[in-house]
Image: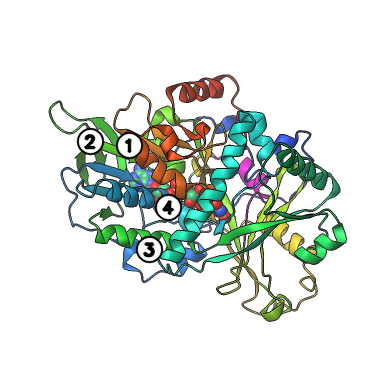
Amino acid sequence: MKEAASSSPKIGSAAGVTLPDNPAVLNAEEYASTPSAKGRAGFPKAGGQSLSYWLQQVRSDPLLDYRTTEQLPEQVDTVIIGSGISGTLIAKHHLETWPERSVIVLEAREFCSGATGRNAGHCKPDQWRHFAKFEKAYGHEQAVQIMNNEAATWRALVSYVKENNVDCDLWVGDTHDVPLDDDVAKIAKECFERYRDLGGKVDHIKVTHNPVEAAKISRIKNARACYSWSASTLQPWKLTAHIMRENLKSGVNLQTYTVAKTIAAGSSGNRKWIVHTDRGDVACDTVVHASNAYIAALEPSLKGVITPKPHICNKVVPPRAMSGSKAIQNSYGVLLPDGGLFSINPRCTADGVVMFGGSNPGQKQLDKWVEDHPEHCINDGLANIESITVCVREFVESNFEGWKDAEIGPGEGFDYSWSGIIGLSADGVPFVGELPGKPGQFICAGHHGHGMARIFTAAPGVVKVMNGEPWEATGLPDVYKMTPERLQRLQSATEVAPKVAIV
Ligand SMILES: Cc1cc2nc3c(=O)[nH]c(=O)nc-3n(C[C@H](O)[C@H](O)[C@H](O)COP(=O)(O)OP(=O)(O)OC[C@H]3O[C@@H](n4cnc5c(N)ncnc54)[C@H](O)[C@@H]3O)c2cc1C
């Protein structure tokens, strides 16, 4: 593992992968947090971040270190903490709802250099796969709401990009979910059929359980089945930057390299809250926490409720045997035993470089290392983690025709991977709403490794809550709502039985 070449633990290969005995854990987007993860928190890593492929592409963009004003304003109406896709979209909807109110977005480091600027670039609405998991946790109706919300989120993102001609390498096409062995295929089939039989909308999903046909459709040799529906891939930094540039035109004050350190109550008769930063104080009436994985560093009531965890994205330049007319033309979720998943984004409308994210089996070794070294829970300076790359290599070589025997010249192959920090929510779903006991402070966070299929509706949703509209107006699943009861339940659950994550 390379973190600017320092501490290099041995993280082995994907040994010991076992099949889950509980269908509710089928192919989670990421693995559950483990007991000692309880209470883990940290501010964004100050230096030595690895550069994702997305961030490498925009090094001369002035937005990276943009500050609207040289000094911080002494007061504003609203402070938004975080400039990822959440904070940026919240600013957009805030401006549309209250054009007259002043808004500042504080970002600890470069613009959009958190998970959004480091992810695998997949916006893939879950249309059945986690239904059983959510049904088990929250009941049938909520599970259906979640599936419907993901479809609505994907549509909202695609519409925004198309209507505004956003230059962000958007691809829209069939994504394939492909179970790689018979046991996983059986669990997938049961989950899909249960959803369908309970009236879930599946008419837009093409399914084959014939392995030969599945391999032909998906080009994955060991496919046991194939489920296909519409999804997207994109360059997430460029999308977020487009929205932020529009925000700036409408009056948002963006302050990069500004860390919100603490928040204190304002003095009576003045603004409600004072946000203390490393560059001075800003008084305000409203605070929105869009800091996702980092939120518990600033808001200790969320320790153990939202937990930071490093995740890895691999960038692979396909060999000539998989390029040109033979390039991969679809995105994938490859379903592995034990809840493992490769999420594959082949950048079909752009440079054809293939991103491998998801819950790579090698991630477990990294998780173990982070458990043993909790100070690395916010380490997005990791790069080239062998245990994870090995699993990607084994997968492509044994599944994509021509890859194994391809001659790999300089500039091709497994050239780079980097870490980003996901925010695990203890009950597996995001938090949207007002922070209990903190009137005027709101949250939109805890999106796991799946925020691109959630935030385009969660961000406008939190602004509706801020506007005093009823929860129903948000259109979000009820279980996303932040309530005192939910917070209390999770706080006490993490004390008694830390392993509550339902991911
Ligand atoms: C490797 C990886 C791959 C992923 N792949 C996918 C994928 O393919 N599809 C998908 O849907 N999701 C994916 N995800 C998850 C997705 O990226 C996140 O859910 C989403 O980007 C979260 O957006 P956000 O704006 O809430 O948080 P972030 O993008 O993390 O933004 C939070 C920002 O807040 C800033 N901040 C934090 N604390 C402070 C503070 N105190 N003061 C000032 N600023 C602060 C941070 O620096 C950061 O920029 C992936 C994540 C990772 C790490």
The amino acid type found where label 3 is placed reads: His
Return the residue at label 4.
85
The residue closer to the viewer here, 233 or 466, is 466
Sequence order check: which comes first, mark 4 or mark 3?
4
Q: Which mark is residue 285?
A: 2
Q: Residue at x 70, y 44 (%)?
A: 27
Q: Position of residue 349 (x, y in %)?
A: 57, 72
CA neighbours of label 2 inside 10 A, class few (<14), some (14 to 19), many (20+)? some
Return the residue at label 3.
242
The amino acid type found where label 1 is placed reads: Met
Disc 2 is placed on an element classified as loop
Q: Is residue 360 magenta?
A: yes
Nearer the viewer's eye, disc 1 or disc 3?
A: 1
Sequence order check: which comes first, mark 2 or mark 4?
4
Q: Which mark is residue 291?
A: none
Decide if ligand 1 comes within 8 Å of the CB at mark 2: no
Sequence order check: which comes first, mark 1 or mark 3?
3
Q: Position of residue 373 (x, y in %)?
A: 55, 40
The amino acid type found where label 4 is placed reads: Ile
Quadrant for the C terminus, please. Answer: top right
Q: CA distance from mark 2 to mark 3?
A: 27 Å
Asked if labels 3 and 2 touch by Cβ distance under 8 angstroms, the answer is no
